């Protein structure tokens, strides 16, 4: 069945229909009206999957997708048009162009943590660029995935775009097909499986992965504001965000003060009983719940540390000074647990940050601009912020992606369109003049240069 779908998409691509911008626009407009119609059901599906708060579902999923779609429809003609480039004197006379060419049939594999947005944002860019698409959403968010499948079926013919639901087996079968492009969002481990599957056919890939994101706070930081912004960036989606601050590195002299602000901001956001707050999501499943609660064992939890397996609830939790070989400092946390490590001298944070592969994001809280810039330059990371967390994601003009272990490639806004396009340079040579210098025989020509 999978092979038949992929073949039908390849045949459809060959007809050239997706190369017509009007056709792409027509279907993207239909998608837009369907997504608007289904918005309440999408929010409900996200709640049913992991009690995602309505506000978070709107600002981090549905609104982002609709804005992206609107922007894409507005700019698609401009983005797709061959761009005239200043020619090289060496080619005189010529006119030079960059063509944007769809790759063909692409596979998009999405994760569960923002199951709607991280499936549709690449899909919109892939369709806008003229590709046919197979989307495999996550099996861990069955309500959202089923709704995505229904919406796509309603809007697109399956030979253009289709959703194939399923878990690892389905994903493996999909990866066994020959694709023109694979766009994967998920864990580093599975990212390596995707890269291996792509290698025999030299299929181009984008890998949007994760990492252990440091958040550095120096002595000069506005601590109250830092705490507020960290609490939001860390505990939105119950910490299940690839760019959430993973651990704090803070100047020893301000640590206790920071804890006071953290406590205040956590209870302001989620009350003193976060379990009853409508604004705090749940852990996705038992496996992740167990993985996370193990991180709390034998730790000095100065805030939170409570959990309830019947609800997959883990409270916003802050761990003071975990050792570097403890579970919480082993790998990406991906949950509402925030370890805090104090430093005496900012130069010593190097050892900690360099313990881990290049992270997806890094944050610096400092009012010392030179210091902040120095730290941003010193470390290699996907993207980040000075004096805030995760908001770099929200600017569609900024390419979003990792580096090294945290990913390959980037997308968002126009960058998504470009990601799904082969950038094809073409020189159109004039025939009215032919400078003969480059042609053999070369004898004596070097001297004339
Ligand atoms: P995951 O890697 O377990 O799963 C992602 C997708 O891959 C799912 O659709 C899943 O079905 C599929 N998959 C799982 N195991 C597979 C296998 N062995 N072979 C083939 N396919 C397989 O990731 P997840 O748990 O869904 O998401 C969490 C991870 O994703 C975190 O590491 C997070 O940092 C990362 N993430 C990154 C970004 C980003 O934009 N960089 C965004 C969200 C999440």
Image (cartoon, rainbow, N blue to C red):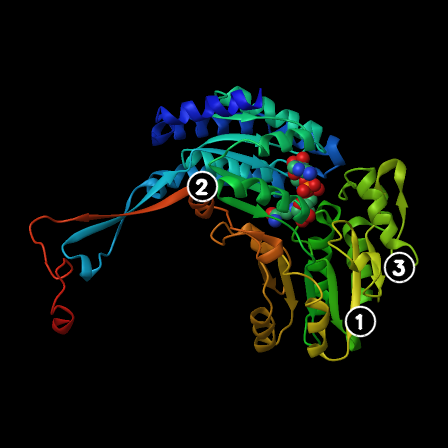
Mark 2–mark 1 Cα distance, whole angstroms, equals 45 Å
- For residue 255, which numbered disc appears in the image? 1
Give the foreground label among 2 and 1.
2
From the viewer's side, name the closer residue of 330 and 360: 330
Would residue 30 be found to the left or right of residue 331 on screen? Answer: left
* Residue at image location 66% in from the left, 32% down from the top: 43
- For residue 420, which numbered disc appears in the image? 2
Say whether marks 3 and 2 touch (CB < 8 Å). Answer: no
Relative to 397, residue 290 above or below: above
Which badge, 2 or 1, comes first in the chain's sequence? 1
Mark 3 burial class by Cα count in 10 Å: few <14, some 14-19, many 20+:
some
Which badge, 3 or 2, comes first in the chain's sequence? 3
Q: In the rendered image, which quarter contains the N terminus?
A: top right
* Residue at image location 7% in from the left, 53% down from the top: 433
From the viewer's side, name the closer residue of 444 and 278: 444
Mark 2 burial class by Cα count in 10 Å: few <14, some 14-19, many 20+:
many
From the viewer's side, name the closer residue of 207 and 395: 207
User: What secondary structure is found at the residue carrying circle 1?
Assistant: helix
Give the foreground label among 3 and 2.
2
* Residue at image location 59% in from the left, 61% down from the top: 381
* Residue at image location 51% in from the left, 50% down from the top: 410
Give the foreground label among 1 and 3.
3
Q: Where residue 171 sits: x, y (%)?
A: 63, 32
- For residue 301, which numbered disc appears in the image? 3
Res 221 visible: yes
Q: Quadrant of ligand 1?
A: top right
Relative to 43, residue 272 above or below: below
């Amino acid at each position: 069945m999978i092979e038949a779908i992929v073949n039908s998409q390849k045949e459809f691509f060959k007809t050239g229909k997706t190369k017509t911008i009007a056709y792409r626009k027509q279907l993207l407009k239909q998608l837009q009206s369907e997504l608007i119609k289904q918005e309440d059901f999408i929010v409900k599906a996200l709640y049913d999957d992991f009690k995602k708060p309505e506000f978070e579902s709107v600002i981090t999923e549905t609104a982002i997708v609709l804005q992206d779609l609107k922007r894409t429809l507005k700019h698609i003609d401009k983005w797709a048009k061959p761009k005239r480039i200043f020619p090289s004197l060496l080619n005189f006379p010529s006119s030079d162009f960059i063509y944007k060419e769809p790759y063909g049939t692409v596979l998009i594999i999405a994760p569960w943590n923002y199951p709607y947005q991280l499936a549709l944002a690449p899909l919109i860019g892939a369709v806008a660029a003229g590709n046919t698409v197979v989307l495999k959403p996550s099996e861990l968010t069955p309500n959202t995935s089923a709704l995505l499948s229904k919406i796509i079926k309603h809007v697109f013919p399956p030979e253009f775009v289709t959703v194939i639901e399923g878990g690892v087996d389905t994903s493996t079968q999909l990866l066994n097909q020959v694709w023109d492009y694979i766009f994967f969002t998920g864990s580093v481990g599975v990212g390596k499986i995707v890269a291996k599957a792509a290698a025999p056919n030299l299929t181009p890939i984008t890998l949007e992965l994760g990492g252990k994101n440091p958040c550095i706070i120096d002595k000069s930081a506005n601590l109250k504001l830092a705490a507020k912004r960290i609490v939001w960036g860390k505990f939105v989606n119950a910490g299940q965000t690839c760019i959430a601050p993973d651990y704090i590195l803070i100047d020893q002299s301000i640590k206790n003060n920071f804890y006071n602000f953290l406590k205040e901001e956590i209870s302001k956001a989620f009350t003193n009983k976060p379990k009853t707050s409508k604004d705090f999501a749940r852990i996705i499943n038992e496996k992740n719940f167990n993985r996370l609660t193990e991180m709390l064992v034998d730790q000095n939890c100065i805030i939170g540390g409570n959990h309830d397996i019947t609800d997959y609830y883990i409270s916003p939790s802050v761990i003071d000074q975990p050792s570097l070989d403890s579970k919480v400092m082993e790998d990406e946390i991906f949950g509402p647990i925030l370890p805090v490590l104090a430093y005496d001298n900012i130069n010593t944070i190097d050892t900690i940050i360099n313990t881990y592969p290049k992270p997806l994001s890094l944050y610096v809280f400092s009012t010392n601009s030179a210091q902040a810039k120095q730290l941003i330059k010193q470390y290699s990371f996907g993207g980040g912020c000075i004096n805030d967390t995760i908001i770099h994601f929200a600017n569609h003009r900024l390419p979003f992606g990792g580096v090294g272990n945290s990913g390959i490639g980037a997308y968002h806004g126009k960058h998504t369109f470009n990601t799904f396009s082969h950038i094809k340079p073409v020189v159109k040579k004039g025939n009215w003049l032919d400078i003969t210098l480059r042609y053999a025989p070369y004898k004596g020509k070097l001297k004339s240069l």
